[in-house]
Each structure stands twice: as C-alpha cells, then as structure tokens.
Image (tube, rainbow, N blue to C red):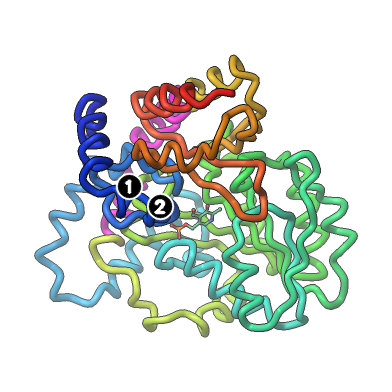
Amino acid sequence: MKTVNRRQWLQSSVTAAAGFPFLMNVRQTRAPLSGTDELRLNSNENPHGPSQKVLDAISASMSKGNLYPWSDKEVLRQHLSNFEGMPLDHIYIGAGSTEILQVAAMAFGLQRGKVVSCYPTFPVLMQKAADFSAEWLKLDLKDHHYDLQTLADHCDDKTSMVYICNPNNPTGTRLDAGELKQFAREISKRTMVFVDEAYIEFSEDGLATSLASMVRDEPNIIVARTFSKIYGMAGLRIGYAYAHPDTLMTMRKHRIGYGMNVPMTSLRAAMAALDDQDFVAYCRKENNKARDIACAAFKEWEVHYVPSHTSFIYFKHDRFHGNLQKQLHARNILIRTYRDQPEYSRVSIGTVEQMEMFVDACQKFLG
Ligand SMILES: Cc1ncc(COP(=O)(O)O)c(C=O)c1O
C-alpha cells in the first residue's frame, strides 16, 4: 500500500496542525495542492492505483517521449475495440472524461437550447453548456434516485441533450439497466442522450449493465467512461467514449490539441490497465470492504446515508455536532460538502485502514 500508515499519519497530522495553522484554515477541501499528509476522501480517487503493470508501462514508454502519440492512440482504440467488441470508428479517446463531457456540451448542448439532467448530479457537462448560453433544466432526484418518467416528460423540441450519470455522483445510486435502456432508446429518437458511466465498474454486475452496446444501433447515444476511478489513474487524465461515428465527428470539432492532448505515457498506461482486469477486481473487492466499514458505523450511529454502488457515500451530517467537514479537515481528513445541499456530505472510499481512521475521527463528533 502506498499510503502512510496510521502512526505516520497521526504524527504528520499533529505536525501539520502545529506548524501550519494558517495554511490549514485557508486550504479548500476540493483540490488540495499536496497530497502527502492528507487523507483525501473528497475527490473519489482510488487509493490503490495505478497498478504495478500500469507503472511498468509508464516507465517503459518514457524513452519514447520524443515521438508524437498518433499511433499509440490508434493502438489504444484497438485495445478498447478488442476489450468490448466496439467498432474502431465508434471510439473516442480524451484527456479524462471531463474532456468528453465538455466537447459533448459544446457540440450538442447548444443546438436547441436546453440541457436536461436530474439534480444533484455531476455538473460539468451542464455547466459547460450553460457557459455557452444553453439553459440547464435541473429536475430533483426522487429520494436520491433518478426519475426517468419526469426526465422524459421534460424533454421537448428545445432539448438538445439529456445527461444521465449512472451510477450517480454524488448520491451513489444507480438505475435499473433495463429501464435505462428503454428510456435511452425512446428519448434518443428526440434528442442526444449522454450516459456518464464513470463509476460503473464499481457497481454490482459492472460493465454488464452498461449502455455501450446500444451505440451501434442508436446514433443519439453517447457513453463516457474513465480510467480515473476503478483503474486509479486520475492524474494520468485519460478517458473514452463510445458513440456513432457521425456523433464523434461533431464532437471532434470541439476538441483541443488536434487529437494529441493525451500523452503517450497515459495512452500506454491505459492499454496496460485494460489488460490488468485482476487489478480491477481487486479494487472492487477492496472498495466494498472499506465501504462496509463506513456503512456499518453510520448504521450503528443512525447516520442517514444513501446505499452506494460506487466509491463514495453520500450521508447526512446532522448526527454530528459542529461542522464535520472543518473538524475533520483540522485532522487532515478531507471530505466533500455542497453549498446547495447543506445537509449532506460525501466521503470517498479509501483503503480499509483509511476508512477506519475516518470512522475513528467521526466518532469524536457524534452528537
Ligand atoms: C460522474 C463523473 N464523471 C466524470 C468525472 C470526470 O472524471 P475524469 O475527467 O477524471 O475522467 C468524474 C470525476 O469525479 C465524475 O464523478
């Protein structure tokens, strides 16, 4: 494990608190600058990654850094095609799925003016579309779950795109695959449907519940995935999307860097990651174990939390006294809060040991 052990962490926590009280007060939890002494349970990073095979592939590719990565991108597309039986011309590779969300927002978010999503969800696509003056229609989740009927009822001739995050960030809930497929088949006759599957590998049945195979027959469906989450490669900035070649052509007009924005090291790392499905299985197993630790504590403390199919848990912090996020932050544990969802926090799943630290720390603030 590359993380600090419990004693080192406690020591560094005390030292940091004593030496840098000013820094500790002003640091934001969203994007800490240095991760060496912080327990980062705020950005859904995978504490196990990257795998050793990925690290080896990166090392081996460094000496080829004088070459443009054209052919590496093609080789990765071939890998993805073999991995999931997707035709090569249905595959887009981007600098993380953030790039894919943004180019889709620019390509389709503007056309008829309205982008529809449930809320709360991962906002990047809609925010980018709104930057370009599209209207973002937010429909409340029902009891933290998607309500496909309400989404369908709000898609009209002004809707250019519907965004679905499955499983959803930040609630960790997921849709029934059959119902989602039926919804996507129907709605994509009227508008573009973007399905963000950033966490799908963590969920039970994983990729078997994906909508990827639909893009072969339905030109108005985009499925986006990332190497940032289960593969533990968030810092390497690589993701991919599946869609009809015409849809991808429209998206490519908005990309930055003429298709060369993903470095060779990351492309080769992604190939090694795909070939290492044992590591994926390991991460899923460890994630479940560590998630169970937090859920068991929440249950015992009667903390309301939403059962999660992902690498994070959305929970209500009213059983804790004071400001839980700030108090954990003072102990170098970062969690995520939301200005517009003031009753809830989100904790990312770390290692088993890290979740024990999180539980120990939270216990001190139980009301
Ligand atoms: C639902 C969802 N989609 C996309 C992303 C973006 O991931 P990346 O750009 O690292 O691939 C995230 C990151 O947290 C996410 O939660």
**Quadrant of the rendered image containing residue 112:** bottom right
**Quadrant of the rendered image containing residue 144:** top right
- 2 vs 1, front mark: 2
How far apart marks 2 and 1 lie (CA) works out to 8 Å
- Quadrant where the N terminus is found in the figure: top left
Residue at point 35%, 54% (across, down): 32
Residue at point 23%, 41% (across, down): 18
Q: Which residue is mark 2?
A: 227
Q: Which mark is residue 273?
A: 1
Residue type at mark 2? Answer: Phe
Image side of residue 237 versus residue 180, left or right: left
Say which element carries label 2: loop
Q: Residues within 10 Å of mark 2 (few under 14, many from 20)?
A: many
Vertical placement of residue 160 versus 284, above or below:
below
**Quadrant of the rendered image containing residue 193:** bottom right
- Label 2 lies in ligand 1 vicinity (Cβ under 8 Å): yes
Q: Are marks 2 and 1 in contact (CB under 8 Å)?
A: yes
Residue 163: image x %, image y %?
A: 68, 61
Residue at point 25%, 34% (across, down): 14
Q: Nearer the viewer, residue 64 or 290?
A: 290
Q: Which residues are magenta?
A: 267-290
Q: Nearer the viewer, residue 319 or 57?
A: 319
Q: Is residue 56 magenta?
A: no
Say which element carries label 1: helix
Residue 98: image x %, image y %?
A: 49, 65
Vertical placement of residue 302 versus 222, above or below:
above
Residue 9: image x %, image y %?
A: 25, 32
Image side of residue 110 versus residue 30, left or right: right
Residue type at mark 1? Answer: Ala
- Quadrant where the C terminus is found in the figure: top right
Residue lying farthest to the top in this orientation: 300
